[in-house]
Structures are given as C-alpha cells and as structure tokens.
Image (cartoon, rainbow, N blue to C red):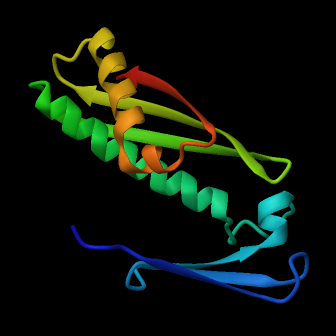
Amino acid sequence: MPSRHSAAAWEGTLRDGTGTFVIGEAYHAGEMSFVARFEDEAGESAKTNPEELIAAAHASCFSMALAADIERAGYEPERVDTTATVTLEDLEIKTIALATEVAAAGLEDDELQELAEGAKENCPVSKALTGPEITLEATLV
C-alpha cells in the first residue's frame, strides 16, 4: 500500500498566528486559526482546525469500511453518510461521535448495528485513534 501524506505550517504565536494545510498532492488546501479552533467567532468560518480534519478523515474511513462490510455481508450499499464530531476539552480530544445513515436494500437494523460496530472498531483511522472514546449512532434510511 502506498504511503499518504499531508502537510501543515503555522506562522506566529499560537493566539495571533495563522496556519495553512495541504491534503495530499494539493487536493485540498486551507487555513487554520486559533479562533477557529478554540472559539466560535464570526469571520472564522472559512478556516478550520486539526479536530475538523481528524473528523473528516474518520468519517471518510468509517464510511468506506462500512460500505465494504455491507457488501461482504451480501448487500449492495447505496449510500453511507457519516458525520464525525470531535470534542476537544482541556487540550485533549475526549470523544469522537460517529453518526451514520445507511441505505442498503434488504439490510435489517440489527445487522446494520453489528456491521457498524465492526467498522467503527476496525477502520484504520479508528485504530489510530485509540485514545478518545469513539461513540457511534447508526441509522437505516
């Protein structure tokens, strides 16, 4: 498997500085700021922070893993929509809440719950994020 990379840079002090990031081979680039990370002030909505990037990575990884597990279970996944909410408290990621909605013909809720738990435990990003509690809410649509 190939290695993947992203890059980030920060200029200035933590509070007054600004940062930039590039995901992969410049597939996406953006700005980061202290305010976007620790406060919710107007005007900072175009900027992001590491927790949002972790949330995006986790939601993506989980969705792909769950789609693969649904297919292996004999169903055809039409769509797996996942939101990951990362909570930062006292400079520590305390929780990651996954909420997913799945459309797959014939899939029953009890089997979805089992498959979703498996994807939560086994997707590579979940495995990398073993410190915070990772919760999950799966909904069949």
120 vs 105, nearest the viewer: 120
Q: Is residue 93 above or below residue 70?
A: below
Q: Does residue 43 appear in the picture of this structure?
A: no
Instruction: Look at the image and tell me in which quarter the N terminus lies.
Output: bottom left
- Taking the view exactly as shown, the residue that stands out farthest to the left is 74
13 vs 77, nearest the viewer: 13
Residue at the image position 50 percent from the left and 32 percent from the top: 99
Q: Quadrant of residue 65?
A: top left
Q: Does residue 80 appear in the picture of this structure?
A: yes
Residue at the image position 63 percent from the left and 40 percent from the top: 132
Residue at the image position 72 percent from the left and 65 percent from the top: 45
Horizontal placement of 124 versus 56: left or right? left
Q: Is residue 97 above or below residue 20?
A: above
The spot of residue 75 in percent (x, y) is 12, 26
Horizontal placement of 68 versus 135: left or right? left
133 vs 101, nearest the viewer: 133
Q: Quadrant of residue 34?
A: bottom right
The spot of residue 32 in percent (x, y) is 70, 75
